[in-house]
Amino acid sequence: MTVISNTSETKNYLFVKTDGKMVKVNFEEILFIEGLKDYIAINKKTEKLIILQNFKTMEENLPTTRFIRVHKSYIVSLEKIDSVERNRIFIGTKIIPVGDTYKDAFFTKINKPYYN
């Protein structure tokens, strides 16, 4: 239940092992990734994939031009952000908190000054 390494910024997918099979996940399908103790939930528009994977390893396998860690338990797709209000990110109906540790990097990445 691991991710096959895909560190190249030119690739637009990765393979994850879930339910005993390898599944191709296109980056464009990912809304956000949520840490669940020893597991990770890859939230897509149509489904949620649960994999046994270290959160940091998953973060390292995602292109930094498309994804950013915004909380100890969340990585978001920059393309899928609908809006940002204070320290909250809205993606569809999901509200994702922006942690203090990640706030500066996130707001720098989206080119907006943050406010409280």
Image (tube, grey):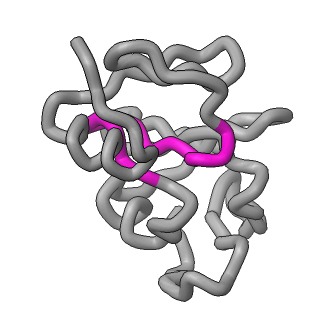
* Residue in the picture at 70% in, 20% down: 92
**Residue nearest the viewer, comparing 93 with 84:** 84
Whether residue 36 is visible = yes
In the figure, is residue 79 to the left or right of 113?
A: right
Depth check: give the residue in front, 96 or 15. 96
Task: Please identify the dominant SS of the magenta region.
Answer: strand
Q: Quadrant of residue 85?
A: top left
State whether residue 67 is above or below residue 96.
below
> Measuring 69% from the left and 52% from the top, which residue is drawn there?
19
Asked whether, in this view, residue 46 is left or right of residue 50, the answer is right
Residue at 76% x, 63% y is 26
Quadrant showing the C terminus: top left
Counting from the top left corner in percent of width and height, residue 3 is at 53, 70
Across and down, in percent, residue 59 comes to 39, 61
Image position of 15 with respect to 97: above or below: below
Pick the front one: 39 or 43: 43
Residue drawn at 77 percent across, 50 percent down: 29
In the image: residue 44, left or right of residue 114 = right
Q: Is residue 75 magenta?
A: yes
* Residue 62 in view (yes/no): no
Q: Position of residue 20 (x, y in %)?
A: 69, 60
**Residue 76 falls within the magenta-colored stretch:** yes
Magenta-drawn segment: 68-80
